[in-house]
Image (cartoon, helix red, strand yellow):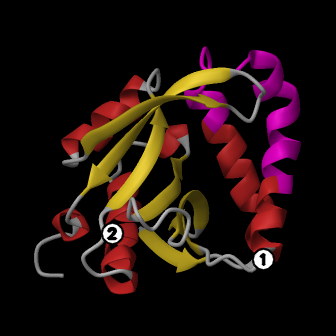
């Protein structure tokens, strides 16, 4: 059974492990193998420790399947308000994909975006070469709004796409 719960500082190691594991499963050929295999775990742990220590507003939910953490979603509502509410992370363990966990996390993020910033779009960035994620976001009604070359955490460059949902309420299940 799927449940979503707010994340706490004690969850940092779990979030970092889910994050790095998702990158290893999805970013081969996008980020260097050396980074994914040797540095991603420590890098993501440092990132999440920094985020929890920062005064910036952070909204984070962990998805649990039968009590076990299997994914998470993170909003940084104040990152670039001119673009909308920033969905910075949406990750589901590779062995748990196809159960609707990502869709549930996306709906929770959309509901929070509607609550926190009515009338503002929801947006995210995704590596263009992450074809599976791009296809999911397109199926969920995301509109490709921008394409740009970006610096990656591994110190390389990659092309990223900004997907936007002008009306995040369209991501909510009927009746919510």
Which secondary structure lies at badge 1?
A: helix
**Residue 66 seen anywhere in this rendered image of the structure:** no
Of mark 2 and mark 1, the one earlier in the sequence is 1
Residue corresponding to mark 1: 9
Which secondary structure lies at badge 2?
A: helix
Magenta stretch bounds: 23-46
| Quadrant of residue 59 within the rendered picture | bottom right
Quadrant, the N terminus: bottom left
Q: Residue furthest bottom?
A: 115
| Quadrant of residue 131 within the rendered picture | top left
Residue corresponding to mark 2: 110
| Quadrant of residue 147 within the rendered picture | top left
Residue at image x 46%, y 20%?
129
Is 28 on the left or on the right of 124, as rendered? Answer: right
Rendered view: 29 above or below 160: above
Image location of residue 163, percent across then percent down: 34, 44
Residue at image x 22%, y 69%?
172
Rendered view: 171 above or below 131: below
Near-viewer residue (70 or 109): 109
């Amino acid at each position: 059974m799927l449940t979503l719960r707010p994340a706490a500082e004690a969850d940092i190691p779990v979030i970092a492990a889910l994050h790095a594991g998702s990158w290893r499963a999805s970013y081969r050929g996008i980020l260097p193998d050396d980074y994914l295999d040797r540095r991603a775990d420590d890098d993501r742990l440092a990132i999440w420790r920094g985020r929890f220590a920062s005064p910036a507003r952070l909204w984070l939910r962990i998805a649990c399947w039968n009590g076990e953490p299997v994914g998470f979603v993170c909003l940084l509502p104040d990152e670039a308000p001119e673009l909308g509410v920033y969905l910075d992370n949406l990750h589901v363990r590779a062995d748990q994909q196809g159960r609707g966990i990502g869709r549930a996390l996306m709906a929770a993020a959309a509901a929070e975006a509607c609550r926190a910033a009515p009338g503002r779009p929801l947006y995210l960035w995704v590596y263009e070469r992450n074809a599976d994620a791009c296809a999911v976001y397109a199926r969920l009604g995301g509109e490709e709004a921008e394409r740009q070359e970006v610096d990656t955490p591994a110190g390389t460059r990659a092309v990223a796409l900004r997907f936007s949902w002008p009306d995040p309420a369209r991501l909510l299940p009927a009746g919510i």
